[in-house]
Image (tube, rainbow, N blue to C red):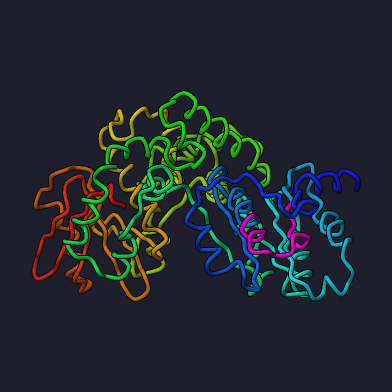
Amino acid sequence: MADIKEQIIRFNKWQFDPSFRIDAGRKYRDLFFVLTKNFIDKDISLSISGLRRVGKTTILFQLINCLLDRKIDHRHIFYFQFSEETANLEKILASFFSFFNDENINRDEFYIFLDELQYVKKWQSLIKDYIDRNKKIKFIVTGSASIYLWRQTQESLAGRMLDFRLDPLSFSEMLRLKENYREKYSIDQILKDGAGQLEIFKKIQHEKMPFKKLFRGYLLFGEFPALLPHLDDFEYLRKYLQDGIIDKILQKDIRLFEVEKQEEIAALYKICCSAAAQMINLRQIARETGLSYPTIKKYLAVLKKTFLMESVKNRLRSIRSQEKSLDKVFPVSINLAAAALSLQDPLNPPYLDFKGHIIENFVYNRVKKMGDVYYYNKAGKEIDLIIEAGNRIIPLEVKSAATLKKTDVNHLAAFMRKNNIDQGYLAYGGDSDIMEIDNKKIYLIPYWLF
C-alpha cells in the first residue's frame, strides 16, 4: 500500500498544490474540444480508446488542467496510470477515497482519470459499483488495447459510460497542430450533409493548396502528434514508429490476448499492410503461411483489437452473400504500414499500383466516422467505398491518377442509377471538378483534401 500511496502522490501533485498544472502543451486534439464542450461536465463517464501514441494520455492531462482552471475542487480530481506491475484498481481507488468520509463519497462530484486501464482485470464491475453509488463520480479512462471489444464493457456499463475513439491525426488535424491551419469546410461533413457544391470544393482546394507539399510527409510520419516537430529526421521517425509503437504492440499488448508467437502475428500484420484497401483471403494466407485458418482468423481479430487493422464488408443485399464475400482490410495508421513495409515514399512505392491503395486507405480513414462503411463488388463492378450516413447512401470512388478516363466513372454511374442516387464522389489526383451523367452529379475531389 505504501508503494501505491507514493505513486498517487507522484501522479497527483495538484492535490497538495492547487496552483500546479501538468505540462501537457497547448496543442489540442479535436477530441479535447468535443469533450470539454459537450461531455466533461455531464454526469456520465467517458472512455477514450485507440492506438498507442495518438495522444490519449495528453488529453487526460489537458482535461485535468481544464478542470483545475474551472476551479473544480482539486482534492476531487484523481489520476493514475496503470502498468502490468500496478494493476490493482480496487486498492488504488480505496486508497484515494480513504481521504473522504462516506457522505462525501455518496454526494460530492469526483473526476477519476484512469490511464492504460487495459492492464486491469474485471475493472468494469468495480467502476460500475462506484457510479451506482454516486452518479457524480465520473471516470475518464483510456486503453491502447481495445478495452471495449474484449472486455464487453458496453454490457456492464451501458448507460453509464460513453466510448470515444481517438485515431491517428487526419491530414487536416495535422495541419492545424503544425501549421495553425483552420479547416473552414469539413469534407466529411459536406459529404454527410449532401451539401457538396463545386464552388465549395474549389474553395477548400484554394485554402489548402499552400500545404499540399506536406502531404507526402504526412503519409510517412504525420499521424502522431509527438513526431510533428521532427518531420525532417527520417531515421529517428522510422525507428520511433517501429520500436516505439509496432514492436510495443506486437510484443507487449498482444499478451493481453494470449498470443505468444509474436513473429507469426507480426508477419500477418505485414501481409495485411501489403494488402491495404484490398480484399483479403484468410484461407489463402493460411495455406501460404502454413498456419491454421482459425489461427489466422484469431490473429486478425487481435490486430483489430489493438487498433492496428480494420476491415469492411462487401455491401450486398443478402447477408449470406455478404458473409461469404471477402473483407477489405485497412491499416488504421498509414505511417505504421509504411514503416512495416519499409516504404521510403508512399506516393512512389516499388509496386506502382500500391499508390492507389495507399490513397484509398487515406480517404477511408477520413470518412469512416461518417457512418457505416462498406465496399461494393458484384459481377466485377466495384465501388471502393459505400458510406451509409443516416438515410444517405454515399458512393465514393478513389483514383490516384491526376487525369481520368471516361470508363473510370462507369461503375460509379451504374451504381447511382441502380440505387437512385443523385450525387456521387470521386477522389483523385486532379483538381476540383464535376461530371454530369444522366442528370446525376459526380463531384471530382482532390484526394489530399480529405
Q: Is residue 404 magenta?
A: no
Q: Residue furthest front?
A: 19
Q: Is residue 132 above or below residue 367?
A: below
Instruction: Judge whether residue 294 can be spotted in this image.
Output: no
Q: Residue at x 38, y 41 (%)?
A: 275
Q: Residue at x 75, y 43 (%)?
A: 84
Q: Is residue 435 above or below residue 234?
A: below
Q: Residue at x 40, y 66 (%)?
A: 371
Q: Position of residue 159 (x, y in %)?
A: 63, 75
Residue 350 falls in image quadrant: top left
Q: Position of residue 229 (x, y in %)?
A: 46, 34
Residue 258 falls in image quadrant: top right
Which residues are the magenta region?
A: 65-79
Residue 135 falls in image quadrant: bottom right
Q: Tell me if 424 is positioned left or right of 269 in this view.
A: left
Instruction: Judge whether residue 130 can be spotted in this image.
Output: yes
Q: Position of residue 2 (x, y in %)?
A: 91, 45
Q: Is residue 68 magenta?
A: yes
Q: Position of residue 191 (x, y in %)?
A: 29, 64
Between 341 and 194, the one lying in front of the other is 194
Q: Residue furthest top?
A: 235
Between 39 and 301, the one lying in front of the other is 39
Between 298 and 160, the one lying in front of the other is 160
Q: Tell me if 302 is positioned left or right of 6 in this view.
A: left
Q: Is residue 54 above or below residue 312?
A: above
